[in-house]
Amino acid sequence: MSSRIRRWVETDTGHRVPNHKSKCKHMHGHRYRWEVELEGSVVTEEGVSEEGMLMDFSDISRILNEYIHDVVDHSFIVFEGDNEVLKALEHLGNQHRTLVVPFVPTAENLAKWAYEQVEPHFKSKYGNSLKLRAFHVRETPKSWASWFALE
């Protein structure tokens, strides 16, 4: 038997999909939701703060804030091959928050990227088989993408 829990943070982040056939080829932004899904058994060690939990939600929030929120909130995510936008962003100087990534910043690719950023930080202190099962990215209220761990 195992439990699953989820925790999320939201950011205001810009991007563009340079080769998109429609309006997503333009620079724009979203209110993203970055959501982790953890799985494992609850901590059974008596007297510890996490007893009865898979992981403390505040510890999950700390990880999400450090490795996702503080990196992409009020930033513009740009594909390293998008020379047109990179050149435009250069004019804003180093005060502009830009995250250059080696992939087109679609919701699918961002879910994989986010998974890889946080996965090393979800470790159990109590041997309760804690595992990052999936990372979900909501780009709009109707549009989600997920990256799942292999079984």
Image: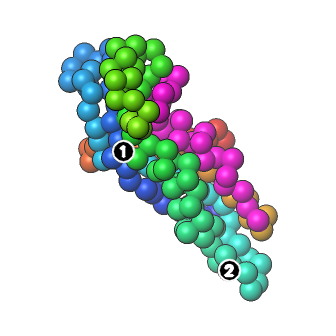
Residue 45 screen position, x and y as percent: 77, 78
| Tag 2 secondary structure | loop
| Tag 1 secondary structure | loop
Residue 20 screen position, x and y as percent: 29, 18
User: Which colour scheme appears in the figure?
Assistant: rainbow
Q: Nearer the viewer, residue 71 or 146?
A: 71
* C-beta proximity under 8 Å, tags 1 and 2: no
Q: CA distance from mark 1 to mark 2?
A: 34 Å
For residue 2, which quarter of the picture?
bottom right
Q: Nearer the viewer, residue 64 or 129?
A: 64
Tell me the magenta residue range. 99-125
N-terminal of the pair, mark 1 or mark 2, is 2
Within 10 Å of disc 1 (Cα), the crowding (few <14, some 14-19, many 20+) is some
Query: At label 2, which amino acid type do we have?
Result: Ser
Q: Quadrant of the C terminus?
A: top right
Q: Quadrant of the N terminus?
A: bottom right
The answer to whether one can see residue 34 in this image is: yes
For residue 150, which quarter of the picture?
top right
Q: Is residue 131 left or right of residue 104?
A: right
Q: Residue at x 48, y 50 (%)?
A: 70
Residue 85 screen position, x and y as percent: 34, 20
Q: Residue at x 49, y 23 (%)?
A: 103
Residue 34 screen position, x and y as percent: 44, 49
Can residue 74 be found in the magenta stretch?
no
Q: Which mark is residue 49?
A: 2
Q: Which mark is residue 136?
A: none
Q: Which residue is mark 1?
A: 74
